[in-house]
Image: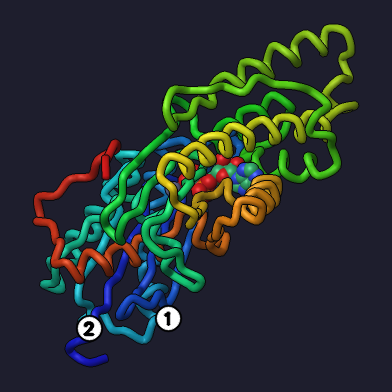
Amino acid sequence: MGTNDISILAIESSCDETSASMIVNGKVLNNIVATQSVHEKYGGVVPELASRAHQENLIPVIHEAISTSGVSKDQLSAVAFTRGPGLMGSLLVGVSFAKAFARALNVPLIDVNHMQAHVLAHFIEDPKPSFPFICLTVSGGHTQLVLVKDFLDMEVIGETQDDAVGEAFDKTAKLLGLPYPGGPLVDKYAKEGNPKAFQFPITRMPGLNYSFSGIKTAVLYFLRDQLQENPKFIEENLPDLCASIQYTLIEMLLIKLKEAVKQYGVKEIAIAGGVSANSGLRSTLSELARRKGWNLYIPKFEYCTDNAAMIAMAAHYKYLKGEFVGMDVTPLAKMKF
Ligand code: KG4
Ligand code: ZN
């Protein structure tokens, strides 16, 4: 490690993953993640339990990120953290630690927007998209279409006006009696089902925006009617139900993506976020990309779900531009680009 090397420790604590990552000269050295299983029995993330779990996990996770990197803490160039969007109590744990650590080491502090970081996860490993590209970020907390003009120059061109698509997967899965988080299970059962077995309405919002709250209500009423006639309706039709719900959600995602491509004339397409693990979305999107001649980029799953490597990547570009924040910085539950 020379004096010109840029080494940054990055911390992510916006929701229910506690994560730390070390990056040197733009190369991610590690990505340590502690997942909080405490929320499973509640069927969703419980904010107060998340904050408490961050308090428990943060120091061990950071210790591991530093000790396995070969970089000693007095060689750090900066400390970076997720400023928002996210759960206030969870963000506070990461921000407070980052401030104290940066002050103790006398190095600059870098704040990172979690949604920008999801997009920049595409620059952790090859192949990397070229600018401009369109990124569809889909997870339990977010659904956004982003026009990416440069590393730190992005524009949200469409987003959900209510639930995120991951929430729609999880909430409809719950109606089917599946445990939280239901998204991966819907994916699993859908593989054996007929996507055209049942029809659920496609919600069309103005512009490039999304709405995913309607499908939950549609599935709720549909199941209520069917169960009145046949109490075993769900168990007899689980794969078809999962396949049909998944088909509807994927259709909604791709209709707006196609419109965005047409509107902006961009053929570099990326997806990010936990829902990009969905095998139906992957295969439908890959087929669409092949037909339309798009270049499609999907990062490793480790970099799709919440992680500090993507925060580190964003922090590296901010360091190069000298974009630091003062010690009076505060977390933002809602944060624009
Ligand atoms: O990015 P992520 O780990 O955390 C958030 O920032 O929300 O995304 C989690 C979401 C959950 O809603 C989960 O059900 C969904 O991603 N998910 C999936 C699949 N794997 C994860 N949804 C559908 N199919 C999957 N295979
Ligand atoms: Zn996220």
Tell me which residue sits at (83%, 7%) in the image: 228
Characterize the local packing of mark 1: few (<14), some (14-19) or many (20 or more) Cα atoms within 10 angstroms.
Answer: few
Q: Is residue 176 left or right of residue 167?
A: right
The part of the image, by quadrant, that contains residue 240 is top right
**Real-space CA distance between mark 2 and mark 1, rounded to the nearest whole angstrom:** 14 Å
Q: Is mark 1 within 8 Å of ligand 1?
A: no
Q: Which mark is residue 68?
A: 1
Q: Secondary structure at mark 2?
A: helix
Instruction: State the image coordinates of residue 184 (x, y, percent, origin top left).
Output: 68, 45
Q: Residue furthest bottom?
A: 2
Q: Nearer the viewer, residue 122 or 222?
A: 122
Instruction: State the image coordinates of residue 333 (x, y, percent, origin top left).
Output: 29, 37
Q: Is residue 161 visible from the viewing direction of this image?
A: yes
Classify the position of the N terminus by image quarter. Answer: bottom left
What residue would you read off at disc 2? 75
Whether residue 285 is situated above or below residue 211 in the rendered picture: below
The part of the image, by quadrant, that contains residue 286 is bottom right
Q: Nearer the viewer, residue 6 or 299?
A: 299
Q: Is residue 36 left or right of residue 8?
A: right
**Residue type pointed to by label 2:** Gln
Q: Nearer the viewer, residue 178 or 258?
A: 258
Q: Which one is earlier in the sequence, the residue at label 2 or at label 1?
A: 1
Q: Is residue 182 left or right of residue 237?
A: left
Q: Which mark is residue 105?
A: none
**Residue type pointed to by label 1:** Thr
Classify the position of the C terminus by image quarter. Answer: top left
Instruction: State the image coordinates of residue 236 (x, y, percent, origin top left).
Output: 90, 26
Tell me which residue sits at (11%, 72%) in the image: 106
Q: Secondary structure at mark 1?
A: loop
Q: Is residue 36 visible from the viewing direction of this image?
A: no
The part of the image, by quadrant, that contains residue 186 is top right
Instruction: State the image coordinates of residue 17 (x, y, percent, origin top left).
Output: 46, 52
